[in-house]
Amino acid sequence: MPDLDAELVERVARWCAEAGRATTPAEIQRALSALSWDEVLAARALLADPPPARPLGPFALADLARGLPADAAAEREREGRYPSPDAVAEPTGAAPPVETAPPPSARRAGRRAKPGVVIRRARDAAPPAPPPAPTPPLVDELLLPEGRGVLERLVRRHGARRPALVAALTAGWRAGDGHPLADADLSRLLEHHGLARAFGRRERDELLHALRACGGLRAAAAARLGLDIDGLDAALARTGASAEAERIREARRAEVRARGTLARRVRLLLEDAPRLEDLGLLDEIEQDLRRRLPEHVRAVGVGSGPLVLALAQSLSVTPAQAKELVDRFAIALEAPRGRAPARAPASTARRERPLGPPRPASGKPQGGMRPPTRGGPRPSAPRPGRPDRPGRPDRPARSDRPGRSDRPARPDRPGRPDRPGRPDRPARSDRPARSDRPGRPDRPGRSDRPARPGHPGRPGARPSGPGRKPPPRPRRGE
């Protein structure tokens, strides 16, 4: 009887399962124990190939190893000629039963009692147990030379932001004593690998950039960096950037103070109060508005009813915001007694003026222009003289004013002969006639020229009027 190892028994069980026959190790031991060495080798060769028929059990496999055809072995398996697995499970030492052919009635009953279809539902299957979580390595492993590359990759991914780097280290590594990783562990790793100085410069630049991008607001910059305000102040002090951060905030304060108009300061107070408080300008803006708003209300005041609307229009805010200003600064809405309320702004009065009857036509047209006189008579109303002109009663009329001939001479004014700049130029009376001038010897003087026919009061004028043609002009030299 050859010894059957566990590997052979397992291979026979899988082969029988593929052939449609479930078996047990005891049944396999009993079926193959009666084989010789050559038959066991033949059985191993059969196990190397798929089952040639169905169903086939271990006893059918033994018959195949002895030389029985596969279809005959499958027929015996279907007819129930081989022992069942329950009959094989007997106590050790019991005599094996004698194999006898079952009666025909038993064979027919075995054919009828076939196993039905087994349905396995997925919801009935037990969920697989989750694999145990892997234990993270110790953070001290980052002190090895390869830990420098790990730190550089983390800095490139998260930047020089200590909260993000500490969170990344906590997710992948653990401390030896079980306490959570902190900022001190990150500083120790940076110092060990010589990255502390470069990391400090980059951290300083990122802090100042975040503060500058947020307009000098510490709360917004801290939220952008994943810190609180105290943490931001501590980081600025650690990197030596507190003075630069204060200069950035002071520049932002100067920009806010430059918005000096009343409307812009009111909108700053109503819309950006948290930012003003962060910059330390909230009390200053409130004091300025508390001083200037009452005067503005008295200038715009139109009574208790429309005052809120007029105030909202003058400050470019909504009526609800104007009412909030009135309640916040305790501004009186009533005009003082015995005094008429101030006039509403021109834009408001023009917008609220009711439509009335058209104005009567007058001699002066709209727009201040005089009526056209071309082609029509002028107005017959006499124009008052200058003595009757209002505002200048003591000024004489133009006819009573002295002319140029009556004006006194100026003895201190030098004459033309003594005019500076032309001392050698003779007077007009001493100048030679035009005929005596060189260059035009044939041209007579102005006094010797014949007068042209024309108007008697205008010598030399050309004739005018319809039907009159001026005489031909004499040519030169005639």
Image (cartoon, rainbow, N blue to C red):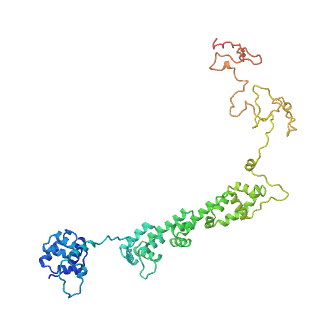
41 or 314, which is in the foreground? 41
Above or below residue 384? Residue 247 is below
Q: Quadrant of residue 399?
A: top right
| Quarter of the image where the C terminus is located | top right
Please give the count of numbered marks on the rendered protein.
0
203 displayed left or right of 325: left
Is residue 184 in sight in this rendering? Answer: yes
| Residue 102 horizontal side relative to residue 201, left or right | left
Residue 11 shows up from this direction:
no
Task: Out of 306 and 4, give the one closest to the viewer.
Answer: 4
Which residue is located at x 51 percent, y 69 percent? 226
Q: Is residue 344 or residue 45 the one in the foreground?
A: 45
Query: In the picture, residue 50 is in which quadrant?
Result: bottom left
Give the image location of residue 449, x and y in percent: 70, 15
Where is residue 279? Give x, y as percent.
Answer: 61, 66
Most distant residue in the front direction? 105
Asked if residue 27 is positioned above or below residue 472 in the image, the reply reads below
Quarter of the image with the N terminus in it = bottom left
